[in-house]
Image (cartoon, helix red, strand yellow):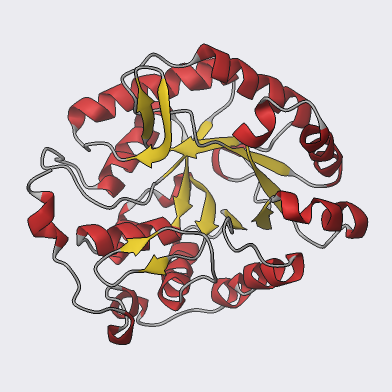
Amino acid sequence: MATRLGLPNLGLGLGLRSQHFEHILKNNPAVDWFEVISENFMDSHGRPRHILHQIAERYPVVMHGVSLSIGSTDPLNLDYLSSLKQLATEVKPAWISDHLCWTGVLTTNSHDLLPLPLNDESLKHVCNRINQVQDYLERPLIIENPSTYAAFNNSTLPEWEFLRIMTEETGCGLLLDVNNVYVSSFNNDFDPVEYIKGIPHDKIVQMHLAGHQNCGNYIIDTHDREVNSQVWKLFQLAYQLANEASVLLEWDGNIPSFDVYHSELLKSKQYMDATFIGVENEVRFMDKEQISNPLNLFEMNKFI
């Protein structure tokens, strides 16, 4: 069924990981769709790409990138875009996504998703580049909110407002990473519920779920464990507001067996189907026993 931006609600999906290739091809598990990291296949014409073709014949596929660098001041990398478009032509993804970030400068890729100052100048810059990418790819681009660990002193827009204007100006869609909202809210001292309520729900094409590591003073977006209980509750609120979005679980470190991975994804059903009362009060703060001596990052941020 076509929904946001004319794109389908794919249901419940998993990030495609090489450890599970054999299991998927042999068993055809009951997963609605798979998301692939674009860069893992763009320049490969061997076994990984061959396997991707086989999986794309059996399941809907989405391409998720980490190197578009939409916020960089470098010119857009046309070689990268050409390879991205060629892969899309072959596997026919439901959509292509990447992050609101920059990954490098002076043609050097840091392979990190680096944050932007959120102000009118950066908004205009990002919108211009999104329009260029969409024109080149001949399809809407889906942009994900990143996890952040500090904020810029010259930011004048909350991230949810930045995303709202960005989608209005460009027609792009949103990939709402619920775990990233929670991680960033803890690290940068903002209200995750206000964030979820403030973003344009009708532009949310997809949601991400993942695990994180609580280090006491800060949280790291590790994708190496189960989804935190507070993130599940925040997801429940987000899904009530944008319930036609496709949902995907990411797991990139300490990757478990496929069955364990799939079981974690299926937990989402209980949060999607139930009406949760009082979620706002339950997800604004970490459980007290999970943190020790939390750092007030507001004081740290003013120096950035």
Can residue 38 be seen in the rendering of this structure?
Answer: no
Between 253 and 58, which is closer to the camera in this rendering?
253
- Rendered location of residue 275, percent (x, y): 49, 79
Residue at point 30% right, 40% down?
Answer: 115
| Image vertical order of residue 158 relative to residue 45, above or below | below
Residue 188 sits in which quadrant? bottom left
Residue 257: horizontal and vertical position, in percent? 73, 67
Q: Residue furthest bottom?
A: 289
Q: Is residue 6 left or right of residue 216?
A: right
- Residue at 64% from the left image edge and 67% from the top image edge: 265
- Picture residue at 78% right of the left edge, 33% below the top: 49
Seen in the picture, residue 38 relative to 200 is either above or below; the reply is above
Asked whether 76 or 48 is in front, the reply is 48
Q: Along the horizontal axis of the image, is 243 left or right of 257? A: left
Most distant residue in the right direction: 26
**Res 258 seen here:** yes
With respect to residue 60, does 106 lie above or below? above
* Residue at x-position 57% and y-position 59%: 253
On-image quarter of the C terminus: top left
In the depicted structure, whether residue 101 falls above or below residue 107: below
Q: Quadrant of residue 62?
A: top right
